[in-house]
Amino acid sequence: MGLNGAPMTYEVLMAQRSHIIQQSIRQAAGDMRLMNPVALVENHPSCRKNREGQKVLPNGQSWRHQMLLLCYSSKILSEANSLLKLQDPNPGKLFGFRFRSPSLPFLLSSLLQSRAHPKLSAEQGGNEGDSDVELDDYSDVEQDDDEEEYDQLPPFKPLTKAQLARLTKEQKNAYFDEYDYRVKLLQKKQWKDEIRRLKEMKKRGKTDLDDYGYANIAGENDQDPPPENVSVPLPDMVLPPSFDCDNPTYRYRFLESTSTVLARPVLDAHGWDHDCGYDGVSVEETLAILSRFPANVAVQVTKDKKEFSIHLDSSIAAKHGENASSLAGFDIQTVGRQLAYILRGEAKIKNIKKNKTTGGFSVTFLGDIVATGLKVEDQLSLGKRLSLVASTGAMRAQGETAYGANLEARLKDKDYPIGQSLSTLGLSLMKWRRDLALGANLQSQFSIGRGSKMAVRLGLNNKLSGQITVRTSTSEQVQIALLGLVPVAASIYRSFRPSEPSFAY
């Protein structure tokens, strides 16, 4: 019987069983490239026979001829391989596990990702200026009149809930409009004060920089020591939709350590019921090597009864003046039962005022396989709102090469980061083994009214398959939550409506 109790043909049943056997052989051998043929044999005494007296399968075909043809063809192919001296690509082994050939598109996609270079904090001798934030884009801060307008506003007294309840609808709208306007002006003022502070630190840092472009803090030892850090509770996890005394949210709370090493448990939100939910630990640390080179190290280890995975992401950066920096990193990734060791490096140069060029490479070790890759990336800012990022690269291993390119355009809100509206358009291209993959995605987030936000994501590839995601959050129109009943009703409708069985091989 098939899905929903529908009858299944003999051919479909045998195709499914053959596929299951082949999958089991591939998993046991650790090589998904294996294509073991499957033959059907029927030796039951009551088996049907044809006119020639040969036993036949339920579909009427003689299995003996198929079996002999399969054996002879396998023997002929084996002898041809020995005569032609074709090498059987035997995957390498590491820690007793057999590894398959690496997925070059996956490694290339990881290489093409933009990475922020670590920077020193103020306590470590840095100027707290983020290289990804262009302070020159805010050169008109002094000429803006929003700050003066905020200072000239009359006093504003917030109303209580009881006072708001006595207002009419028009009065409430006018009150909230005035409140939002004042909050926006205050946020603009605070943001501009922060920009001025960063500019002052940048100007002051230029007068006392060492050969590496970092601030010289040798003379700051005579000042008063900074106040000691105090452990504070970390944000609690999201509460479950219904109360369960065995849920780890109610049982575990932890403090943020005063040490530079930050250790946190890894929660599996999709684990078993009444389980602790913690299957691993995550450790992060930010340090300054020789007080000059900022470094970030993040390790996450996950272990349960069946699987063990580790993910390491480490990088160290060096600053070369104000317009150049370099980065070196070492990563460990777990893909299925495979461990990949990645060495990477890149250099970022600021060509002009609003243009940055990055060149990088990576070397991936996967058993006996070595994959090397190169990339070039360019970032261009067009005004305050529009920015373009283009990257291209190639990855090569075992005589095969994968090529890829990404293009991303980002349009920010006029008052960003005060206004959270943001739209991103991304295009990607990947070529490997004569296959060309094209993809496009559009992401946009914007506000709807005062207490509602919406995020829309569209994705499409060259095979005309994609996904549309719409996410809405609101604190006013609570009835929007009733839309969540639509997929439930659709699922109930499909369960009662008979449909044709479909099988995937």
Image (tube, helix red, strand yellow):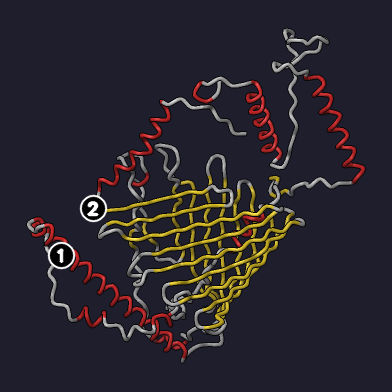
Name the one closer to the observer, 478 or 234. 478
> Quick check: 449 above or below 384?
above
Q: Mark 1 highlights which residue?
A: 174
SS for dot 1: helix
Query: Furthest-right residue in view?
Result: 83
In this view, the residue in front, 220 or 136, is: 136
Q: State the residue at coordinates (39%, 66%).
A: 258
Q: Is residue 47 visible?
A: yes
Badge 2 is on which residue? Answer: 476
Counting the numbered discs, the total is 2
Q: Which mark is nearer the camera, 2 or 1?
A: 1
What x and y, as percent, mark residue 109? 60, 59
Above or below — where is 75 with respect to 385?
above
Callout 2 amino acid: Glu
Quarter in which the N terminus is drawn: top right
* Relative to 362, residue 216 above or below: below
Residue 418 coordinates in the image, percent (x, y): 33, 70
Report if the CB atoms under discs 2 and 1 are less than 8 Å apart.
Answer: no
Q: In the image, residue 480 lies at what x, y percent?
A: 28, 47
Q: Secondary structure at mark 2?
A: loop
Position of 74 with respect to 358 (left or right) is right
Q: Position of residue 308 (x, y in %)?
A: 57, 46
Residue 31 in sight from this viewpoint: no
Q: Is residue 104 left or right of residue 440?
A: right
Label 2, label 1: how far apart the Cα atoms are: 16 Å
Q: Mark 1 or mark 2, which is nearer the start of the sequence?
A: 1
The quadrant of the picture occupied by the C terminus is top right
Q: Quadrant of residue 106?
A: bottom right
Residue at (39, 51) in percent of width and height: 470
